[in-house]
Image (cartoon, helix red, strand yellow):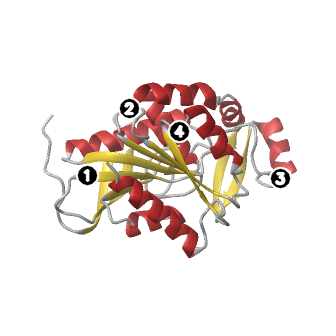
Amino acid sequence: MVVQAPISTPGAHSLTLVNSKTGNKVAGILSVKDPASSSLCVICHGLCSSKETGIIRTLGEDLDFNTHRFDFAGNGDSEGDFRYTGYDQEVEDLRAVVEGLRSRGWNVACILGHSKGAHAVLRYSSTYGDVPKVFSLAARFDFSQQPASRFTPEQLQAMEKDGFFLWNVRGRDYKVTKEDFKERDSVDMVPLLERVKTTHPSVPPFLLLAHGEADETIPVKDVDSIAAILGPSFCRVVRIPGADHFYRRPEDAQAVVQAASRFLKEG
Protein backbone atom coordinates (compact mmCIF):
# COMPACT_ATOMS: atom_id res chain seq x y z
CA MET A 1 0.00 0.00 0.00
CA VAL A 2 1.30 3.41 -0.97
CA VAL A 3 1.11 5.86 1.94
CA GLN A 4 0.43 9.46 0.98
CA ALA A 5 1.74 12.49 2.84
CA PRO A 6 -0.86 13.94 5.22
CA ILE A 7 -2.53 17.24 4.36
CA SER A 8 -0.44 20.00 5.92
CA THR A 9 -2.53 23.07 5.09
CA PRO A 10 -4.14 24.48 8.27
CA GLY A 11 -7.93 24.63 8.31
CA ALA A 12 -10.93 22.39 7.65
CA HIS A 13 -10.87 20.06 4.65
CA SER A 14 -13.66 17.88 3.28
CA LEU A 15 -12.43 14.29 3.12
CA THR A 16 -14.54 11.37 1.90
CA LEU A 17 -13.31 7.83 2.52
CA VAL A 18 -14.84 4.49 1.46
CA ASN A 19 -15.93 1.52 3.54
CA SER A 20 -14.63 -1.28 1.31
CA LYS A 21 -16.93 -3.84 2.94
CA THR A 22 -20.11 -1.95 2.03
CA GLY A 23 -18.90 0.30 -0.80
CA ASN A 24 -20.46 3.29 0.99
CA LYS A 25 -18.79 6.68 0.95
CA VAL A 26 -18.03 7.96 4.46
CA ALA A 27 -18.08 11.76 4.53
CA GLY A 28 -15.86 13.64 6.95
CA ILE A 29 -14.12 16.88 7.85
CA LEU A 30 -10.39 16.89 8.48
CA SER A 31 -9.32 19.80 10.70
CA VAL A 32 -5.59 20.52 10.58
CA LYS A 33 -4.49 22.46 13.65
CA ASP A 34 -0.81 21.51 13.78
CA PRO A 35 0.72 21.13 10.29
CA ALA A 36 3.98 19.88 11.82
CA SER A 37 2.29 16.86 13.40
CA SER A 38 0.86 13.76 11.73
CA SER A 39 -1.02 12.71 14.88
CA LEU A 40 -4.79 12.94 14.76
CA CYS A 41 -7.94 12.21 16.77
CA VAL A 42 -10.98 10.64 15.07
CA ILE A 43 -14.34 11.88 16.44
CA CYS A 44 -17.55 9.78 16.27
CA HIS A 45 -21.08 11.18 16.66
CA GLY A 46 -24.08 9.71 18.45
CA LEU A 47 -27.58 8.55 17.52
CA CYS A 48 -29.41 10.57 14.84
CA SER A 49 -26.54 13.04 14.74
CA SER A 50 -23.68 13.96 12.43
CA LYS A 51 -20.20 15.45 12.21
CA GLU A 52 -21.82 18.90 12.42
CA THR A 53 -23.93 18.30 15.52
CA GLY A 54 -23.38 20.03 18.85
CA ILE A 55 -20.51 18.68 20.90
CA ILE A 56 -19.01 16.86 17.88
CA ARG A 57 -18.59 20.08 15.93
CA THR A 58 -17.30 21.88 19.03
CA LEU A 59 -14.63 19.23 19.59
CA GLY A 60 -13.60 19.30 15.93
CA GLU A 61 -13.30 23.07 15.89
CA ASP A 62 -11.99 23.85 19.38
CA LEU A 63 -9.53 21.06 20.14
CA ASP A 64 -5.92 22.19 19.71
CA PHE A 65 -5.16 18.89 17.99
CA ASN A 66 -5.63 17.58 14.45
CA THR A 67 -9.05 15.93 14.15
CA HIS A 68 -11.22 14.07 11.67
CA ARG A 69 -14.95 13.92 12.37
CA PHE A 70 -17.21 11.86 10.11
CA ASP A 71 -20.78 10.66 9.52
CA PHE A 72 -21.73 7.05 10.12
CA ALA A 73 -23.69 5.30 7.34
CA GLY A 74 -27.16 6.77 6.81
CA ASN A 75 -26.33 9.90 8.79
CA GLY A 76 -25.28 13.36 7.63
CA ASP A 77 -23.59 13.25 4.22
CA SER A 78 -22.53 9.59 4.26
CA GLU A 79 -24.06 6.91 2.05
CA GLY A 80 -25.90 3.84 3.31
CA ASP A 81 -28.96 3.12 5.40
CA PHE A 82 -29.61 4.47 8.88
CA ARG A 83 -29.74 1.90 11.67
CA TYR A 84 -31.05 2.55 15.17
CA THR A 85 -28.52 -0.07 16.23
CA GLY A 86 -26.11 -1.34 13.54
CA TYR A 87 -23.27 -1.46 16.07
CA ASP A 88 -20.98 -3.72 14.03
CA GLN A 89 -21.65 -1.62 10.92
CA GLU A 90 -20.48 1.49 12.75
CA VAL A 91 -17.32 -0.28 13.91
CA GLU A 92 -16.55 -1.08 10.27
CA ASP A 93 -17.22 2.53 9.24
CA LEU A 94 -14.76 3.60 11.93
CA ARG A 95 -12.28 0.97 10.73
CA ALA A 96 -12.54 2.32 7.18
CA VAL A 97 -11.83 5.82 8.47
CA VAL A 98 -8.84 4.73 10.58
CA GLU A 99 -7.30 2.77 7.71
CA GLY A 100 -8.09 5.49 5.17
CA LEU A 101 -6.38 8.12 7.30
CA ARG A 102 -3.36 5.90 7.87
CA SER A 103 -3.02 5.40 4.12
CA ARG A 104 -2.87 9.20 3.86
CA GLY A 105 0.03 9.43 6.28
CA TRP A 106 -1.89 10.15 9.49
CA ASN A 107 -1.09 8.58 12.84
CA VAL A 108 -4.47 7.91 14.47
CA ALA A 109 -3.54 8.60 18.08
CA CYS A 110 -7.04 8.54 19.57
CA ILE A 111 -10.63 7.64 18.81
CA LEU A 112 -13.27 9.70 20.60
CA GLY A 113 -17.00 8.98 20.59
CA HIS A 114 -20.11 10.54 22.12
CA SER A 115 -23.13 8.47 23.25
CA LYS A 116 -23.73 5.82 20.55
CA GLY A 117 -20.36 6.90 19.13
CA ALA A 118 -18.85 6.14 22.56
CA HIS A 119 -20.14 2.60 22.22
CA ALA A 120 -18.57 2.46 18.75
CA VAL A 121 -15.10 3.37 20.05
CA LEU A 122 -15.35 0.85 22.90
CA ARG A 123 -16.59 -1.83 20.52
CA TYR A 124 -13.82 -0.97 18.05
CA SER A 125 -11.25 -1.34 20.83
CA SER A 126 -12.65 -4.74 21.79
CA THR A 127 -12.31 -5.88 18.15
CA TYR A 128 -9.18 -4.18 16.77
CA GLY A 129 -7.42 -2.54 19.70
CA ASP A 130 -4.91 -0.77 17.49
CA VAL A 131 -5.44 2.87 18.50
CA PRO A 132 -3.34 3.99 21.50
CA LYS A 133 -5.97 6.17 23.23
CA VAL A 134 -9.75 5.97 23.54
CA PHE A 135 -12.06 8.71 24.85
CA SER A 136 -15.57 7.51 25.68
CA LEU A 137 -18.04 10.37 26.28
CA ALA A 138 -21.45 9.51 27.78
CA ALA A 139 -21.35 5.81 26.97
CA ARG A 140 -24.21 3.46 27.87
CA PHE A 141 -23.62 0.39 30.02
CA ASP A 142 -27.15 -0.93 30.56
CA PHE A 143 -28.75 -1.47 27.15
CA SER A 144 -31.99 -2.70 28.70
CA GLN A 145 -32.74 0.93 29.58
CA GLN A 146 -33.68 3.88 27.39
CA PRO A 147 -35.42 7.22 28.05
CA ALA A 148 -39.08 6.56 28.86
CA SER A 149 -40.22 9.38 26.57
CA ARG A 150 -38.18 8.32 23.53
CA PHE A 151 -40.99 6.41 21.77
CA THR A 152 -44.77 6.83 21.98
CA PRO A 153 -47.22 3.98 22.73
CA GLU A 154 -48.48 4.35 19.15
CA GLN A 155 -44.97 3.78 17.76
CA LEU A 156 -44.48 0.69 19.88
CA GLN A 157 -47.87 -0.63 18.74
CA ALA A 158 -46.81 -0.07 15.11
CA MET A 159 -43.64 -2.01 15.87
CA GLU A 160 -45.69 -5.01 17.00
CA LYS A 161 -48.06 -4.77 14.07
CA ASP A 162 -45.75 -3.84 11.18
CA GLY A 163 -42.29 -4.70 12.45
CA PHE A 164 -41.14 -1.07 12.31
CA PHE A 165 -42.14 2.54 12.93
CA LEU A 166 -40.92 5.97 11.86
CA TRP A 167 -39.24 8.16 14.45
CA ASN A 168 -39.05 11.89 13.71
CA VAL A 169 -35.95 13.59 15.06
CA ARG A 170 -35.24 17.23 14.18
CA GLY A 171 -37.52 17.03 11.14
CA ARG A 172 -36.19 13.78 9.69
CA ASP A 173 -37.98 10.42 9.79
CA TYR A 174 -35.79 7.51 10.90
CA LYS A 175 -36.93 3.91 10.45
CA VAL A 176 -36.67 1.81 13.61
CA THR A 177 -37.25 -1.93 13.28
CA LYS A 178 -38.02 -4.86 15.55
CA GLU A 179 -34.61 -6.28 14.59
CA ASP A 180 -33.02 -3.10 15.96
CA PHE A 181 -34.71 -3.68 19.31
CA LYS A 182 -33.54 -7.30 19.37
CA GLU A 183 -29.96 -6.27 18.60
CA ARG A 184 -30.03 -3.61 21.31
CA ASP A 185 -31.38 -6.06 23.87
CA SER A 186 -28.60 -8.52 23.04
CA VAL A 187 -25.75 -6.13 23.94
CA ASP A 188 -23.79 -7.32 26.98
CA MET A 189 -21.14 -4.80 27.95
CA VAL A 190 -19.36 -7.03 30.46
CA PRO A 191 -17.63 -9.39 27.97
CA LEU A 192 -17.07 -6.48 25.56
CA LEU A 193 -15.21 -4.52 28.23
CA GLU A 194 -13.25 -7.60 29.29
CA ARG A 195 -12.08 -7.93 25.67
CA VAL A 196 -11.06 -4.25 25.65
CA LYS A 197 -8.67 -4.99 28.50
CA THR A 198 -6.91 -7.67 26.47
CA THR A 199 -6.15 -5.34 23.55
CA HIS A 200 -4.18 -2.58 25.31
CA PRO A 201 -1.45 -2.31 27.95
CA SER A 202 -2.78 -1.20 31.33
CA VAL A 203 -0.10 1.37 32.18
CA PRO A 204 -0.64 4.21 31.70
CA PRO A 205 -4.48 4.12 31.52
CA PHE A 206 -5.33 4.37 27.82
CA LEU A 207 -9.05 5.03 28.19
CA LEU A 208 -10.77 8.20 29.42
CA LEU A 209 -14.42 7.97 30.43
CA ALA A 210 -16.33 11.26 30.76
CA HIS A 211 -19.96 11.80 31.69
CA GLY A 212 -22.26 14.66 32.64
CA GLU A 213 -23.67 14.36 36.13
CA ALA A 214 -27.07 15.73 34.98
CA ASP A 215 -27.35 13.34 32.01
CA GLU A 216 -31.02 12.29 31.67
CA THR A 217 -30.48 10.18 28.53
CA ILE A 218 -27.77 7.86 29.88
CA PRO A 219 -27.50 8.02 33.69
CA VAL A 220 -24.13 8.86 35.17
CA LYS A 221 -24.15 5.54 37.05
CA ASP A 222 -23.39 3.86 33.71
CA VAL A 223 -19.91 5.39 33.63
CA ASP A 224 -19.26 4.00 37.10
CA SER A 225 -20.34 0.54 35.94
CA ILE A 226 -17.97 0.70 32.96
CA ALA A 227 -15.11 1.93 35.12
CA ALA A 228 -15.70 -0.80 37.70
CA ILE A 229 -15.14 -3.50 35.07
CA LEU A 230 -12.16 -1.85 33.39
CA GLY A 231 -10.49 -0.85 36.65
CA PRO A 232 -8.16 2.09 37.42
CA SER A 233 -5.21 0.50 35.62
CA PHE A 234 -7.05 0.80 32.31
CA CYS A 235 -9.24 3.91 32.64
CA ARG A 236 -9.85 7.21 34.36
CA VAL A 237 -13.20 8.91 34.92
CA VAL A 238 -14.10 12.58 34.51
CA ARG A 239 -17.52 13.62 35.83
CA ILE A 240 -18.77 17.01 34.66
CA PRO A 241 -21.04 18.65 37.27
CA GLY A 242 -24.36 19.93 35.94
CA ALA A 243 -23.74 18.73 32.38
CA ASP A 244 -26.57 17.11 30.42
CA HIS A 245 -26.19 14.43 27.76
CA PHE A 246 -25.54 16.91 24.95
CA TYR A 247 -23.28 19.35 26.86
CA ARG A 248 -25.50 22.22 25.76
CA ARG A 249 -24.10 24.79 28.17
CA PRO A 250 -20.95 26.39 26.72
CA GLU A 251 -19.03 25.79 29.95
CA ASP A 252 -19.89 22.06 29.82
CA ALA A 253 -18.80 21.74 26.20
CA GLN A 254 -15.54 23.46 27.03
CA ALA A 255 -15.01 21.14 30.00
CA VAL A 256 -15.17 18.24 27.53
CA VAL A 257 -12.75 20.00 25.16
CA GLN A 258 -10.32 20.65 27.99
CA ALA A 259 -10.50 17.06 29.25
CA ALA A 260 -9.88 15.76 25.73
CA SER A 261 -7.00 18.19 25.17
CA ARG A 262 -5.24 17.13 28.38
CA PHE A 263 -5.75 13.46 27.57
CA LEU A 264 -4.38 13.82 24.02
CA LYS A 265 -1.25 15.59 25.25
CA GLU A 266 -0.41 13.02 27.92
CA GLY A 267 2.41 10.59 27.32
Q: Which numbered tag is attached to residue 232?
A: 4
- Which residue type does callout 3 highlight? Thr
Which label belongs to residue 39? 1
Q: Residues within 10 Å of mark 1 (few under 14, many from 20)?
A: some
Q: Earlier in the sequence, mark 1 or mark 3?
A: 1
Residue located beneath label 2 in the image: 21
Circle 2 sits in a helix, a strand or a loop, which is it? loop
Q: Is residue 27 visible?
A: no
User: x and y percent of residue 184 in the render?
Assistant: 67, 35
Q: Is residue 39 left or right of residue 220?
A: left
Q: Amino acid at mark 2?
A: Lys
In the rendered structure, which disc, 4 or 1, sits on the residue that comes first in sequence?
1
Picture residue at 39% right of the left edge, 40% below the top: 204
* Residue linked to disc 3: 152
Discs 4, 3 touching: Cβ within 8 Å = no
Closer-to-camera residue (69/190): 190
Which residue is painted at 39% across and 60% down in the image? 261
